Amino acid sequence: MNLRLLLILPVVLGFAFGENLLTNGDFEQELTVGWTQTYGGYGYHNVERSTWRHPDPDYEVWAQQYDGLGWNRLEQVVEVKDVDIDFSFIAKFDIGNGSSTCWPVAAVILAYYNSGGALLGDTRFCHASPYCNWTPSSTCNLIPVVGNQWMPWSLNVREEITYNLPGVDAEQVAKIGVALYDYTSGG
C-alpha cells in the first residue's frame, strides 16, 4: 500500500488582513522549525521537504505512510484569540489502491483544541479509499478531495465551526492544529 500526500505552501492560518499564525508555514526553513512529526504503527513513515514536486521554485512537503498499518502526522499547533481566521493551502493528494481490509487516507486536518489541549473537533480535507470508515459528526467535518491534481483550498474557521461543526463551541477554541496526515488501515 502506497500512501502519500503532497502539500505545496504557503499554508496560511491567519486573519483576513494577512497575518500568518504559523511558524515556517511556507516550509522555506527546515521542518524542525515550527513542525512536529509523529507516527505510529508499522511500515515506512516519511516526511520530505523539496522543491522539485511542483513546477514553482518554492518548497513543498511530501508526507508518506507506506506498506503497513500505521499513520504519519506533521503538525503545528498555535494559540488563537479568536476563530475569525482564514485558512488556505494548495495541495495534491495521492493515495494507493485500497481494499476493505487495507484502506488509505491522505488528509489535511484542522484540529480545534481548548486551552487545556483537549480536542473539541476537527475539519478534514481528505482523499480516501472508498472503504474508509471515517464518518462526519457534530465534531468532525469531512471535506472530500477527488482526484490528484494540485488544487487550492480555503475556509474561514468561524464559518466552518458555525455551519458544519455544531458540537464545537467556537468560544472554547484556544488552539488550532494544522496537520498533514496519512493513514493506512492495514498492509
Image (tube, rainbow, N blue to C red):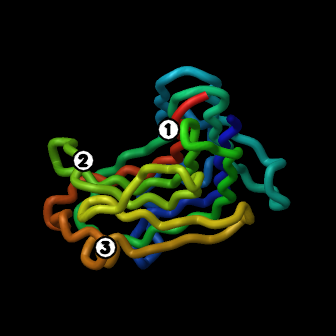
Residue 46, x across and y down, in percent = 64, 30
Tag 3 secondary structure? helix
- The residue under label 3 is 164
**Residue located farthest toward the top when viewing the structure as drawn:** 42
> 10 Å neighbourhood of mark 1: few (<14), some, or many (≥20)?
many
Alpha carbons under labels 3 and 1: distance apart: 24 Å
User: Pointers 3 and 1 in contact (CB under 8 A)?
Assistant: no
Q: Is residue 70 above or below residue 181?
A: above
In front: mark 3 or mark 2? 3
How many numbered circles does the render carry? 3
Mark 2 crowdedness (10 Å alpha carbons): few <14, some 14-19, many ≥20: some
Residue occupying image coordinates x 52% and y 29%? 70
Residue 119's disc number: 2
Amino acid bearing label 1: Arg
Q: Which residue type carries mark 2?
A: Leu
* Residue denoted by label 1: 73
In this rendering, the answer to whether 79 lies above or below 31 is below
